[in-house]
Amino acid sequence: MNPKRILVVGAGHVGLYAALRLSKKLSSREAEVIVVDPQPHMTYQPFLPEASGGNISPRHAVVPLRRELRRCTVVAGAVTRIDHERRTATIQPIVGPTREIAYDHVVVAPGSVSRTLPIPGLHEQGIGFKTIGEAIYLRNHVLELLDVAAATTDPEVRRRALTFVFVGGGYAGIEALAEMEDMARHALKYYPELKASDMRWVLVEATQRVLPEVDRDMGAYTVQQLLKRDMDVRLDTRLESCVDGVVKLSDGGTFSSDTIVWTAGVKPSPMLDATDFPRDDRRRVTCLPTLQVVDGDRVIEGAWSAGDCAAVPDLTKPPGNYCSPSAQHAVRQAQRMADNIVAVIRGREPIDYKHKHAGSVASLGLHKGVAQVYGIKMTGWPAWFMHRTYHMSRIPSFNRKVRVVVDWTLAFFLKREVVALGQLHDPREDFAEASRK
């Protein structure tokens, strides 16, 4: 029997977990697993706020693909087209000409990208918070602005530098805002020229609540905690313009800021536009509960999808509901999908994915958090501890679990690192300037 070739497109939560499970359950005589991703690592996104805040090393928030997927073939490149009718994918390696890879089964899991709106100035001024690079850039950016504010004698320059705007009140926005404010407040110990009241932290949310994944009382508690920290929370408010850093809000507010962080949701990866798979009105790949791609009533044999880019029916809710784009669903879908691919290869029927959302946990900075798990609600230190415990248990590999725990343990005894390494973003600048002379 010739081994089947399984092509995994994307190495996020779905791609990594699916490839890992497939490589463990299938022998080399049964299947070959090929993973394609432009990055050499999987980013554990729930740890981005902790990495940005300096609680863990940025390297420990990512999982090296080649270390974890030793029984898989890892291709560093981007999938530029999938022609499922021919069962081939076109790959653009990091360097060199494109190549085609034929497959028997394909796992379509390129994930999602930031969902932006045509707001004037957002393209030029906005900062995302979805990759490890964006998280570390934001950290360095905030710390550098503290230096700018401390050095200047111009009150307007200082006011602009110390105004930080976060757009989007979901988990990403709330955690990023809370961790960065916590870090900046700690850093002020080393800036005698500045005081906490000089900083202005603004949250802009288009709806009337934050953290829509939890009950309203938990969202209200979160807002109260942010207000206690003197943050400016603007609910039912939209960002209308930020040209040249001049922020204009729908409630009439206008002020200048050098930091505009966009965390207002995600959308399926645009890579899906270069495929022949069916999509729904939100541009997600349409799937059955078995994670098989479906076109109307027709199952597309050999095509599978899950995670942020897939419309997977939620069988724990009334018909017409779909699984939310969360890591909780993505990991479990990946495992069920891998098991179903194994079943199909071995001549068995696939099984439906069904998982009732367990709840959510969120950090609001060091020793602060909210949690709602299986109907149990917690706040403060217990919620923060549950947040850390849960995500430590979910990050892949024993290696990363140990490193994260060591980071946290050292943080109990050593002060938080608050140094900016802005030169990382343009390391050749000094050499280029010297070489001109």
Image (cartoon, grey):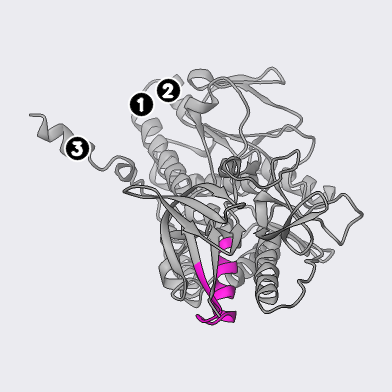
Which of the two discs, 3 and 1, labels the residue nearer the N terminus? 1
Q: The N terminus lies in which quarter of the figure?
A: bottom right
Identify the residue position indicated by label 3 in the image. 430
Q: Which residues are magenta?
A: 15-33
Q: Is residue 393 above or below residue 15?
A: below
Crowd around label 3: few <14 · some 14–19 · many ≥20 (10 Å): few
Q: Is residue 10 above or below residue 81?
A: below
Q: Residue at x 42, y 65 (%)?
A: 414
Position in image of residue 423 (x %, y %) = 29, 42
Looking at the picture, which amino acid does disc 2 mark? Val
Which of the two discs, 1 and 2, labels the residue nearer the N terminus? 1
Identify the residue position indicated by label 2 in the image. 157
Left of 265 or right of it: where is 77?
Answer: left
Q: CA distance from mark 1 to mark 2?
A: 7 Å
**Viewer-proximal residue among 372 and 225:** 372
Which of the two discs, 3 and 2, labels the residue nearer the N terminus? 2
**Viewer-proximal residue among 79 and 389:** 79
Q: Secondary structure at mark 2?
A: helix
Residue found at the far left of this picture: 437
Residue 290 picture quarter: bottom right
Q: CA distance from mark 3 to mark 1?
A: 23 Å
Position in image of residue 426 (x %, y %) = 29, 40
Identify the residue position indicated by label 1 in the image. 152
Left of 224 or right of it: where is 423?
Answer: left
Left of 198 or right of it: where is 252?
Answer: right
> Comparing marks 3 and 1, which lies closer to the viewer?
3
